[in-house]
């Protein structure tokens, strides 16, 4: 996700290190993608269970 000017202003105002913020943001995106793929796998397994 590309930081918007608004997010950059908020980060700056709060005194958060922008590099640490970007690292945290990327970590969150990876975890979200991992969680989404796990949920998709659960749903497909569940649907298979219903078919049987």
Image (tube, grey):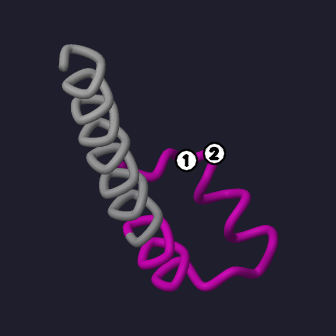
Direction from residue 20 to residue 33 in the image, left or right: left
> Does the segment drawn in magenta span residue 19?
yes
Q: Secondary structure at mark 1?
A: helix
Q: Are marks 1 and 2 in contact (CB under 8 Å)?
A: yes
Q: Identify the residue position indicated by label 2 in the image.
A: 6
Q: Residue at x 68, y 67 (%)?
A: 11
Q: Identify the residue position indicated by label 1 in the image.
A: 5
Tell me the quadrant of the picture where the C terminus can be found: top left
Q: Residue at x 27, y 46 (%)?
A: 37
Q: Residue furthest right?
A: 14
The residue carrying pointer 1 sits among few (fewer than 14), some (14 to 19) or many (20 or more) residues within 10 Å by Cα, namely few
Q: Residue at x 33, y 63 (%)?
A: 30
Image x and y of residue 47, in percent:
27, 21
In this view of the protein, which residue sits in the foreground, 48 or 13? 48
Image x and y of residue 27, in percent:
41, 72
Answer above or below: position of 9 versus 40: below
Q: Residue furthest top?
A: 51
Direction from residue 22 to residue 30 in the image, left or right: left
> Does the segment drawn in magenta span residue 22?
yes
In this view of the protein, which residue sits in the foreground, 2 or 12? 2
In this view of the protein, which residue sits in the foreground, 1 or 52? 52
Answer above or below: position of 30 versus 24: above
Q: Which residues are magenta?
A: 1-26
Quadrant location of residue 22?
Answer: bottom left
Q: Residue at x 60, y 85 (%)?
A: 17
Direction from residue 20 to residue 11 in the image, left or right: right
Image x and y of residue 14, in percent:
81, 72
């Amino acid at each position: 996700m590309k930081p918007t000017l608004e997010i950059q202003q908020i980060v700056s105002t709060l005194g958060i290190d922008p590099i640490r913020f970007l690292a945290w943001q990327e970590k969150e995106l990876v975890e979200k993608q991992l969680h989404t793929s796990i949920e998709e796998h659960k749903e497909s397994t569940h649907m298979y269970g219903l078919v049987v």
